[in-house]
Each structure stands twice: as structure tokens, then as C-alpha cells.
Amino acid sequence: AVLLVLAAATTWWAWLRPEPPLPDAFIGPPRSDYELGSFDMQVFDASGTLRYFVEAPRLARDSQRESFTIDQPRVRLYDKHDQHWLVTAKSGYIDVRGDRIDFNDDVVMNRDSKADPMRFRSERLSAYPEAGRIATTAPIEIKARGGTLTGTGLEADLGAKTYAIEQDFHATLPTTHSR
């Protein structure tokens, strides 16, 4: 009888005891909140002026990094001086506020100008559309007016047309007879 009472009490105690929570089965990087396929997006500043236009085959929102990851972006930057730039890369990130775009892997930035074309090429480039600036710490190549400038690191104000290469600067400039 005592054994029967102990077995019943033990069974009742085991039945009432809560089960421990199961460990999280997911292993790997965090997943995006949502994804868009084959999209385009227009981004305006506070005054309603178009600052940039993005099109890409895929966009994913990363809530951990507070950014949007974009594959093969084509971004058209518009500045206050009616200069338009087309930036292409293999991947990129846009922060959630939209004031910084990071481009990675085979970045090419071309100025849309028949009279004065210009091209930047690098492996990484950050664009700040509202401020009209670009920057990189990676090696950079700039081609303009028949000349080539190379170096490592760049700070550029696109509106003021000032470009500062930080180190390892080299230039190849055409002579007046070669034009």
C-alpha cells in the first residue's frame, strides 16, 4: 500500500512539474524581416527632392544591423547641382534612415555627363546622398578628361567637385598635344 501511494505521488509530482524550455534550434545568421525581388525605390529628402533611385533584383531587411541588403544594386544619385551619378556593384547596404549607402565588390560610379564624364572604380565605396559626399578607405581609380588618378582612400564632395586621395597617389595626365 505504501509503495502504491509513493508511485502515485511521484507520478502526480512529475505530471505537475513544468517541462524545461527547449533550446533554440536555429543556428546561423539572423534572418531578414522581409525580402523584395526585382524592385525599385525612390528616396526623397525632407523637402521632397529626389535624392536617389535604387533598382536591384533583391532587397532584404536586416533588423539586427538596421539596414537593407541589396544584391547587384544600380543606384542613381541626384545632387543639388544637377549632376547625376550611376553606381553599380555586386552588393550593397542602405541604412534604415537612408542617408548612407555602402557598395561592395566591383564598384563603378559614372557621372552622367556627355561634356565631362567621370568614373570612379573601387572595391568599396560609401555614398552620403544628402551631403553629396562619397568616401572609401580602399584603393580607388578615378578617370576623367583623359587622365587617371589612383591611390588609397578617398574623401570627395561631389557638389564642390573636390576630391582628396589619402595615400599612394599617382596620376597620369594627358598633355595638351594628346587631346
Image (cartoon, grey):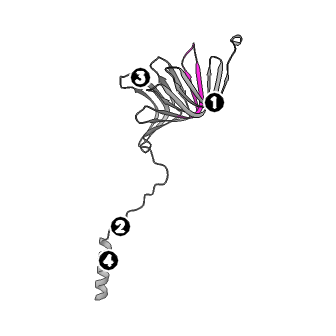
Going by the numbered disc 2, the residue's amino acid type is Glu
Which region is colored magenta? 103-124
Question: Which quarter of the picture shows residue 44?
Answer: top left
Secondary structure, magenta segment, majority class:
strand
Going by the numbered disc 3, the residue's amino acid type is Leu
Q: Which residue is mark 4?
A: 11
Q: Callout 1 environment at 10 Å: few (<14), some (14 to 19), or many (20+)? A: some
Image location (x, y in percent) of residue 112: 54, 18
Whichever of labels 3 and 2 marks the residue nearer the N terminus, that label is 2
Which one is in front in this view, the residue at disc 4 or the one at disc 1? 1
Residue at 37% across, 63% down? 21
Residue at 55% across, 20% down? 111
Q: Callout 2 environment at 10 Å: few (<14), some (14 to 19), or many (20+)? A: few
Look at the numbered discs 1 and 3 and tell me whether their residues touch, using CB distance below 8 Å: no
Residue furthest to the bottom: 1
Which one is in front in this view, the residue at disc 2 or the one at disc 4? 2
- Give the CA separation, mark 4 to mark 1: 76 Å
- Asked whether, in this view, residue 3 is left or right of residue 96, the answer is left
Whichever of labels 4 and 3 marks the residue nearer the N terminus, that label is 4
Q: Callout 4 environment at 10 Å: few (<14), some (14 to 19), or many (20+)? A: few
Helix, strand, or loop for circle 3? Answer: strand
Image location (x, y in percent) of residue 143: 62, 22
Whichever of labels 1 and 2 marks the residue nearer the N terminus, that label is 2
Q: Which residue is mark 1?
A: 151
Q: Which residue is mark 3?
A: 50
Can the viewer see residue 22? Answer: yes
Q: Which residue is mark 2?
A: 19
